[in-house]
Image (tube, helix red, strand yellow):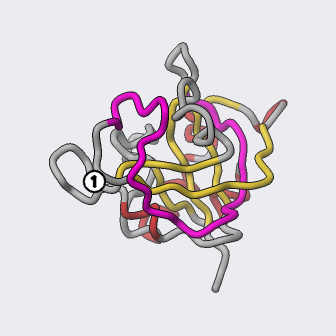
Amino acid sequence: MRKRYWVEITNVYPHGGANWEYGNYLWSPTKDTEGKKIYENMTEVSVGDIIVHFARDIDGKTFVDGESQIATKTAIVSSPPPKPEDWGGREEYYKVELKNFTKYTGNRRREVKEFSMINWDLIENERGKILKFYPFDINGRLNQGKYLCEITEDIYNSI
């Protein structure tokens, strides 16, 4: 099976609480509040896949913040995280353990807005290669309401 590349779009603070922390786990409800299965990409990740973390800080800016690898298969759990915020009160949650989290520094850690402007041609060229949940809209901004999106290896290499 080939390695795939994914973007997690999330808030850094809070991120679930103990044993659900940013950089250590991916997690989401299995369904949205209307019962729709919009988080199904969580079931498509495989051990060894790469996650690039697009993290919103407390000031509301979103950064290309770091990367990690999938360490375990996706589990479905019935206990919510200690700090689920807007994602609380659901029957079940997807939970995936990560490993080797590396926070980007220097030129690699930059606002997603800057990254998308610099790499606009590549982002547009790669759009058709991802059939669902592409992280960028047609203006280069992050698609709202997306949590886990696949990206191509070329986009990953441009980070």
> Could you tell whether 111 is left or right of 83 in the image?
right
Q: Residue at x 62, y 29 (%)?
A: 111
2 or 120: nearer the eye? 2
The verdict on residue 25 being magenta is: no
For the N terminus, give its image quadrant: bottom right
Q: Residue furthest left?
A: 34
Q: Residue furthest right?
A: 106
Q: Is residue 132 above or below residue 32?
A: below
> Could you tell whether 112 is left or right of 76 in the image?
right
Q: Residue at x 54, y 13 (%)?
A: 59
> Could you tell whether 100 is left or right of 150 in the image?
right
Circle 1 is placed at which residue position?
Answer: 31
Mark 1 closeness class: few <14, some 14–19, many ≥20 residues within 10 Å? some
Q: Residue furthest bottom?
A: 1
Q: Measured from the top left, where is residue 34 in percent x and y?
A: 15, 47
Amino acid type, label 1: Lys
Q: Quadrant of residue 18?
A: top right
71 or 68: nearer the eye? 71
Q: Measured from the top left, where is residue 40 in percent x and y?
A: 37, 63
Q: Is residue 71 above or below residue 63?
A: below
Label 1: element kind: loop
Q: Residue at x 52, y 35 (%)?
A: 16
Q: Residue furthest top?
A: 59
> Could you tell whether 155 is left or right of 82 in the image?
right
Q: Residue at x 64, y 66 (%)?
A: 72
Q: Measured from the top left, where is residue 117 in percent x and y?
A: 57, 37
Q: Measured from the top left, where is residue 27 in percent x and y?
A: 49, 49
* Residue range (magenta): 62-88
